[in-house]
Image (cartoon, grey):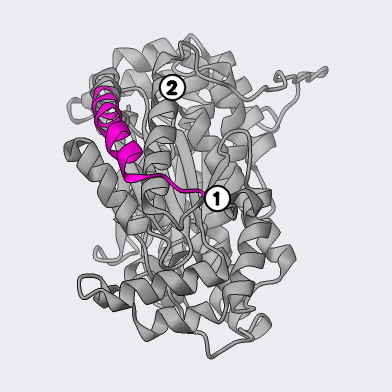
Amino acid sequence: MFQSAEIGHKLGKAAYREAVPALRAALLAAQVDLFEQHKTPVVVLISGQDGAGKGETINALYEWMDPRFISTMAFSQPSDEERERPPMWRFWRSLPPKGRVGMFAGSWYSDPIRERIEGAISVKELDARAQQINRFEEMLVNEGALVLKFWFHLTKDGQKQRLKALSSDPRTAWRVTQWNWDRLKTYDQLQDAARHLLRITNTAAAPWVVLEASDDRYRDLTVGQVLLKAMQSKLAATVAPRTPMAPMVRVDLDGRNVLSELDLALKLADKPYKDELAKWQGRLSELVRDERFKHRSLVCAFEGADAAGKGGAIRRVTAALDARQYQVTPVAAPSDEEKAQPHLWRFWRHLPRHGHVAIFDRTWYGRVLVERVEGFCTEADWLRGYSEINDFEHELIEAGVIVVKFWLQISQAEQLQRFKEREQVEFKRFKITQEDWRNREKWHDYQQAICDMVERTSTGEAPWTLVEANDKNYARVKILRTLCERLEAALQQPTPSDEASTDKPAKDKKVKRGSSDGKK
């Protein structure tokens, strides 16, 4: 992929000065249109070798464009806070909202390349990381983002000359350290890893632009023009591109499904309920204070029919926890800030640190439930939602997060009784709205969506627990018992960090860990 970036591209001063004014004016106009239309975020990845001019190009774009509509994120080694969450957490938090440009100096490509150079991962593992990246970038594009990826390339001699030139100039000498010279020794390994990764991630949704970086003027002007043309093309598009989706086909010839087979008559009398409640709350309290939990975290997802008792069940869970240790996140209609981001963004931002618990009252499954049934998103959106949710949960589990998901099911008759009770009891009236009554009219549609959700997202690593919730006592004890059993089983397994240190030791301990693309 680097041959076309080794032919000596150059641009004279006169040609550069002549081209810049028109480019600046066009970039500013495109920025304003982008901001006013508020429909597209622009994600720009600036990657490449040490000394290739990544920082200079970003500075040039800031000079040519309006900095009010740009944000730059520079990623090096993750902080302690970032290490205690899935690797993609820090990138999700930094995504630009619709109408803005986000420039990434260092990105989700940084760690895979560095780890491959150090020998910490195999080619097969690098390929797996590449496929995860492809799905992430495809999701961004399907959500309306414009993703531009630039790789600044230098030959080995060209990189050496660039470092020498920077070192000899008092104005830039501070930018070159012994670390940069040491990294020059791994040039060949970087080329091999980058060439392989770029080939696999050079997709139609987010292709790479490989640039020769030996000439500053050629490099900066090319990036500016590519960015301009991409923004103009995106602004001119009237229909968002969509990945082709197979239609949802579900046939239950005998009328039976995972919900119809639940025994909603299950009950637990008050006396045994109190004993069981105390037993499992005590066990949960012990488990979250276990030394092993200090290196894990817990995400509890609560979904269910209206009036199924999610709130009461959550209160019985939190009663066993230290208030400093958990956070309950109620999920309603997305705010304007959340609408400006991919739909999973608002859930990534609430992921817990090690030793903490995140409880979601309604969850990311809204995309394949209420948004599907109520028509708040397109069919293509909710169809791809299943795989995006599975990817999200897989990333959590790979990072050591324990994911437990509950669906609370009640009958239509029980729901009607609870609705009427809420209308009669003063301190419960706030719980019942006109929307709840309207949703009852779509009971069959919601049941169909729930069955599809369970079928497509109840995985071996994050299965659904279907809770018979007509009797609140029974439901609450089942939830607590399941939570304890899942938590106890998970704590008996080694953490991902333990497995990494045992199974995949780095081969080259002399190479210091820097940030993206093998750079400091």
Between 26 and 136, the one nearer to me in the picture: 26
Between 154 and 438, the one nearer to me in the picture: 154
Q: Amino acid at mark 1?
A: Glu
Q: Nearer the viewer, mark 2 or mark 1?
A: 2
Q: Residue at x 25, y 63 (%)?
A: 323
Residues packed near mark 1 inside 10 Å, few (<14), some (14 to 19) or many (20 plus): many
Residue 88 lies, in percent from the top left, at 46, 55
Q: Amino acid at mark 2?
A: Lys
Residue 449 is covered by the magenta coloring:
no
The magenta segment is 9-29
Judge whether 468 appears above or below 38 on screen.
Answer: below
Judge whether 396 appears above or below 455 on screen.
Answer: below
Q: Is residue 496 left or right of residue 323?
A: right
Residue 30 lies, in percent from the top left, at 30, 24
Q: Residue at x 55, y 20 (%)?
A: 241
Q: Can residue 269 be seen here?
A: no
Question: Disc 1 marks which residue?
Answer: 393
* First-in-chain label (2 vs 1): 2
Residue at disc 1, secondary structure: helix
Q: Is residue 372 left or right of residue 318?
A: right
Prevailing secondary structure of the magenta residues: helix
Q: CA distance from mark 2 to mark 1?
A: 31 Å
Q: Is residue 409 left or right of residue 320?
A: right
Residue 495 lies, in percent from the top left, at 56, 75
Q: Residue at x 42, y 14 (%)?
A: 236
Q: Which mark is residue 234?
A: 2
Q: Can residue 511 be seen here?
A: yes
Residue 134 lies, in percent from the top left, at 60, 45
The quadrant the C terminus occupies is bottom left
- Considering every residue shown, the one lying at the far bottom of the view is 510
Residues packed near mark 2 inside 10 Å, few (<14), some (14 to 19) or many (20 plus): many
Q: Residue at x 54, y 71 (%)?
A: 157
